[in-house]
Image (cartoon, helix red, strand yellow):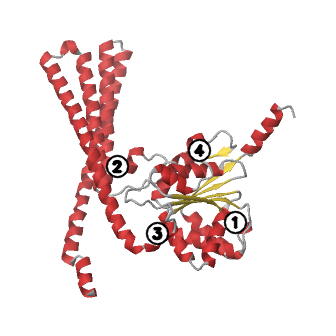
Amino acid sequence: MPFVQAISHEPSPPTTTLGYALFATRWLQAPLYFGLVAAQGVYVYKFFNELWALILRCVTGQATETYVMLAVLKLVDVVMIANLLIMVIVGGYETFVSRIGLQGHRDQPEWLSHVNSNVLKVKLATAIVGISSVHLLQMFVDVHRTSHHSLLWGTVIHMAFIASAAILAYMSGPMAAQTERGHRQPHREHAAPEEPAEKVFVPAQAPSREDEPSVEQRLRAAGFPARKLLEDFDSEHPSSFDREAVARLGKLDFVAARRNVVFVGPPGTGKTHLAVGLGVRACQAGHSVLFATAAEWSARLAGARDAGRLAEELAALDDHAVLVVDEVGYTPFDAETAALFFQLVAHRYERSSLIVTSDRPLGRWDEVFGGPSAPAMVDRLAHHAEVVRIDGDSYRMRRATSGWADRGC
C-alpha cells in the first residue's frame, strides 16, 4: 500500500520535465520587455524634442494660445504613454516572467505588491482611456481644423474604450475572487494534515465555519492593550524618528517577507503605539496577530515548558503571522527564561514575523537576558529585521508637565 501511495502522489519524471521546460519558456518574453524599455527611450527623445520646439516658438513670439495648448497636450500624451509602458514593463514582467525583488524598497509602487493579470488588464484599460481622453481633447481644442467625420469617430472610439474598461473591471472582480479562493483552498488542504497541533492553541478563537475570521475577530483575538493606528501617531513629538521607515513598514511587506521589526527608544516615545499600529494594520490586511508583553510571553512559555508542551506551543504560534513582544528590557530575565525566548526567536526565524519594542539597543540585550543564549537570539532576530530608533522625551511626562502648568503648579 505505501508503494501505491507514492506512485499516486508523485508526478512522473517526463511530465515534470516537460512542465518545467514549458514554464521556462516564459523567459522568451524577457527580450520583449527590454524592447519596450528602448521604446520608452524613444518617447523620452520625443518629449524633449516637442518641449524644445515649444520653447523656441514661445521665445520667438510665434506661439499662439491654441498652439501652446496643443503642444502641452502632446507632452501630456507622451508622458501618459510612457507611464503605460512602465506599467506594462514592470507589471508584465512581474506577472508573467519573474518576481522583482523590491520588498522594502522605499520607491516600490503601491500597486506592485498585489499585481496580477486581472489588475494589470484593468490598469492598462484605464490608462488607454486616459490617453484617448487626451487625444479627444486635442481634437476639441483644434476643432476648426478637425473634420466632423474625425470628431465623430474619435468620440465613438473613446466611448468604446470607456465601455470596454468598465466591462473588464466588472469581470475582473469575480475572477480575482475566484482565483484567491482557489489559492486558499489548496493551502488549507495541505496545511491541515501537516500541523494538527495548531488547532490546540486557541480553540475559543477558531471560527466554527470555514470562512476567514472578520477583521473585528482578528483584532479581538490579538489582545492589543488598546487599538492604536499608525495614522494617529504624533510623529512630531520624537526628536529623532525615521518616518520613511515607518511608512515603508506600514505597507506590511515585512510580513510577506517574514522579516522582523524592532522599535528601540526611551520610555514614552511611542514604541508600543507603533507596534500596535502595525499589528492593527496587519489584522486589517487579513493576518493573524498576537500581542503580549515580554513578561507575559515569558510566563506563557514557562507554563508550556512546565507542562511538557513547549514544542506544541511554539508550533501553535505559527498560526499567527505576526507576534508582538512589548517592553523588552523593563524586567531582567534569568538564563532559563532567556533560553525560552531564544527558542521562540529561533523557531520563528525566517518563518514568521516578530515586532519587538525595547528601551535599549540589541547590543545591550545581555543586560536583560542572562545566560549564553542572548547573543544567538539577537543574531537571529536582527538578521532579517528593520530596526527603528526613536529618541526624545516621554510623551506621557510631557502631558503630565503640561497639566501641572495649566493648573498653576
Tell me the residue at 71%/57% (across/down). 359
- Three-letter residue code for mark 4: Arg
Q: Name the residue under label 3.
A: 199
- Three-letter residue code for mark 2: Val
Residue 365 shows which numbered tag? 1
- Mark in front: 2 vs 3: 3
CB within 8 Å, label 2 to label 3: no
Q: Name the residue under label 4.
A: 243
- Mark in front: 3 vs 1: 3
CB within 8 Å, label 3 to label 1: no
Tell me the residue at 59%/51% (across/down). 276
Dot 3 falls on a residue whose secondary structure is: helix
- Mark in front: 4 vs 3: 3
Dot 4 falls on a residue whose secondary structure is: helix
CB within 8 Å, label 4 to label 2: no
Quarter of the image for residue 121 reads: top left
Question: Does any portion of residue 34 appear in the rendered image?
Answer: no
| Rendered view: 272 above or below 187 | above
